[in-house]
Image (cartoon, grey):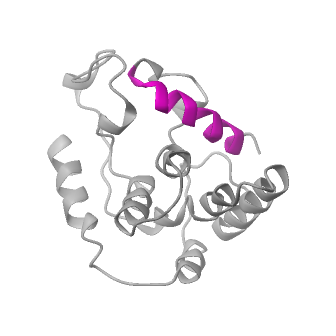
Amino acid sequence: MYNFVKRMREKYKKLNTFKMSVWKCCELLNEVVDDSDPDLDETQIEHLLQTAESIRKDYPSEDWLHLTAQIHDLGKYFKDKLNYNNPSYNTKCGIYSQGCGLETVTMSWRHEDYMYLVAKENGATLPQAGSFIIRYHSFYPLHKEGTYKHLMNKEDEDNLMWLQNIQSI
């Protein structure tokens, strides 16, 4: 799995497969049914708009957080992903060390990782917490169950608060 994820990141990190506006990408989400997202009873675009509006009301001076809420799921239309369990990674830390930081952890390729790379490679000026929210907002075992915290570093712990604030809305 690690090699697959690495190849996918390298392929799509180039961001040369297509171009579209943010709004066009939002519109494409209405064609996506995400059965893996337990929080959704509305269309994907409604979810983005409602999340952004709720965040704007709760955090009116944090414009970076409004933008993060608006774009957090835009990588969902990416369909070439693979998820499976590899028994060689099924120990508490796997190939990682305690406190290594989530940035060093290779996770299965998913829409969040794609959107994170789009923002990063295009020089998005979101603070680190915004990037963290985009990358880990569907990592429910972390922010709902508290698992994998043993891999977090101090920066991850600080950013987790923002992610949990968004998830509670």
Q: Based on the picture, tell me whether residue 132 belongs to the magenta stretch.
A: no
In the displayed structure image, the side of residue 142 where residue 39 appears, left or right: right
Furthest toward the right, the residue is 57
Tell me the residue at 44%/61% (across/down).
Answer: 115
Q: Give how far across and how far down residue 128 sits, in percent.
A: 49, 47
Q: As displayed, is residue 119 above or below residue 31? A: above
Q: Nearer the viewer, residue 119 or 148?
A: 119
Q: Give how far across and how far down residue 157 sits, in percent.
A: 53, 27
Q: As displayed, is residue 154 above or below residue 92? A: below
The answer to whether residue 70 is seen in the rendering is yes
Question: Considering the image in quadrants, where does the N terminus appear?
Answer: top left
Q: Give how far across and how far down residue 96 sits, in percent.
A: 25, 23
Q: Based on the picture, tell me whether residue 159 belongs to the magenta stretch.
A: yes
Tell me the residue at 33%/51% (across/down).
Answer: 109
Q: How many marks?
A: 0
Tell me the residue at 47%/21% (across/down).
Answer: 149
In the displayed structure image, the side of residue 154 where residue 51 appears, left or right: right
Q: As displayed, is residue 113 above or below residue 26? A: above
Residue 14 in which image quadrant: bottom left
Residue 151 in which image quadrant: top left
In the displayed structure image, the side of residue 78 where residue 146 appears, left or right: right
The answer to whether residue 1 is seen in the rendering is no
Main SS of residues in magenta: helix
Tell me the residue at 30%/73% (across/down).
Answer: 15
Q: Nearer the viewer, residue 149 or 125?
A: 125
Where are the magenta residues, as a range? 151-167
Q: Give how far across and how far down residue 169 sits, in percent.
A: 77, 45
Q: Nearer the viewer, residue 148 or 60?
A: 60
